[in-house]
Image (cartoon, helix red, strand yellow):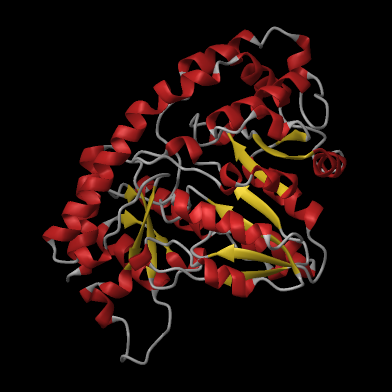
Amino acid sequence: MSIRVNEISDSVTLRLNDQAVKMAEEGKTVYNLTTGQLASKPDFDFIDSIKSELNFLKSYQYSPVAGFVDLREKLISYIFENRHVAKEHFANLDCVISSGGKHNLFHVLLTLVDPGDEVIVISPFWISYPEMIKLCGGKAVYVDTRSFDAFTPSLEAIKKSITPKTKAIIINSPNNPAGIHYSDEWMKGFAELMIQNENVTMISDEIYFELSYFDPAPTYFYNHRPELLSRTVIASGISKCLASTGLRIGYCIAPKKMCSAISKLQSHTASGASSLIQRALASYEFKLIPDYLRPIKNQLRVNAGIVREVLRSRDVARCWYQPLSAFYFMLDLSLTPVFDKYVENKQDHNDYSMKICEDILNKCGVALVPGTAFGFPNSARISMVLEKTPFQIAMEKVADFLIS
């Protein structure tokens, strides 16, 4: 095997999910809280759009490498109408459509990062960021956060992490795995910081933008400083907002020169994204997305409340912070009574996330993802997409384990 493949890590999210599925197939009751996949069909109007394209020859042939022009223009308009950015600020931007959000982000990093370049990543982070950076020959530089601050990074810490080698910073708001989004005040301060660092590209991963379920809604640094769009890449896709993880459509919006480079790279890696799904999206009314997501966001609000009340009822409320968006809650295991059973003494700073999550799965039948994978040791990510009743049962089992 190549050195680059040997140096990257497996996806822990998928590995524990596979273990949970295997246990369920063996007849065991398992509550799977590992993945960010809604157990619901996409919007019926979107399904109808797909069906309506099945009889067209063009839906089965190559699309342009960057995607169909009409869909690219539609995505640009959709993004900036929702982000409340004036049209004149995206005149010099373009769009590239790829085979999923992960594929899209990897192409962005491959286009930007040379060996030895540094990319700032805020912890906890989506597990694939560091591996992608590593595959590009770059170095991930981490900025830590704390649950006490609802995982909001210090702007001063970001400032200190910027060096002459810094090529980019990834901002993931709404955030996977923390389930929060950064405040407008924070975004304003970040914008001013980036104005002072003109050689740094901002990669804004906004895949969960539509899944904000508590006000105020997410805003972005470019709302305060639109001129930053000249060195910003906005990354998104349909996996989360249309419950379509398997349809593999992601996209980025960036300066035209960068999109041209990304498209050139994509021409040698994937040719283009699915023509059928692209054409279906071109005829789908994006304004229907809020109606489709309304019951899903209501469910997330309910489940967030369940997490709060269950932790409070077991006197472990110090683990609580308010999730605002996306599907997740990060449980700080180091703040729970059971953690004392794993550490040898107060000077023991080892990470027990994997061991604790394995014990929770084997003893309680609840699958969580160890926080190690997200750069936040001695924690676990809880996915809140289950329906209310099974989620309540799962959380009570976890909470009882935490105080056992």
Please identify the quarter of the rendering in which residue 266 is found: top right
Residue at 55%, 16% in the rendered image: 285
Image point (66%, 62%), residue name: 131
Q: Quadrant of the C terminus?
A: bottom left
**Quarter of the rendering containing residue 220:** top right
Q: Residue at x 50, y 43 (%)?
A: 219
Q: Nearer the viewer, residue 347 or 74?
A: 74
Q: In which quarter of the image is the N terminus?
A: bottom right
Residue that sits furthest to the left in the current view? 313
Task: Name the image quarter holding residue 50.
Answer: top right
Left or right: where 27 falls relative to 120: left
Q: Position of residue 347 (x, y in %)?
A: 36, 92
Vertical comparison of 36 with 277: above or below:
below
Q: Say if 225 sits above or below 373 in the image.
A: above
Residue 134 in the image, given as x and y percentages of width and height: 71, 66
Q: Position of residue 5 (x, y in %)?
A: 73, 64
Picture coordinates of residue 152, whole percent (x, y): 44, 61
* Looking at the image, residue 297 lies above or below residue 134: above
Q: Is residue 85 left or right of residue 292?
A: right
How many marks do you count on the picture? 0
Q: Nearer the viewer, residue 338 or 94?
A: 94
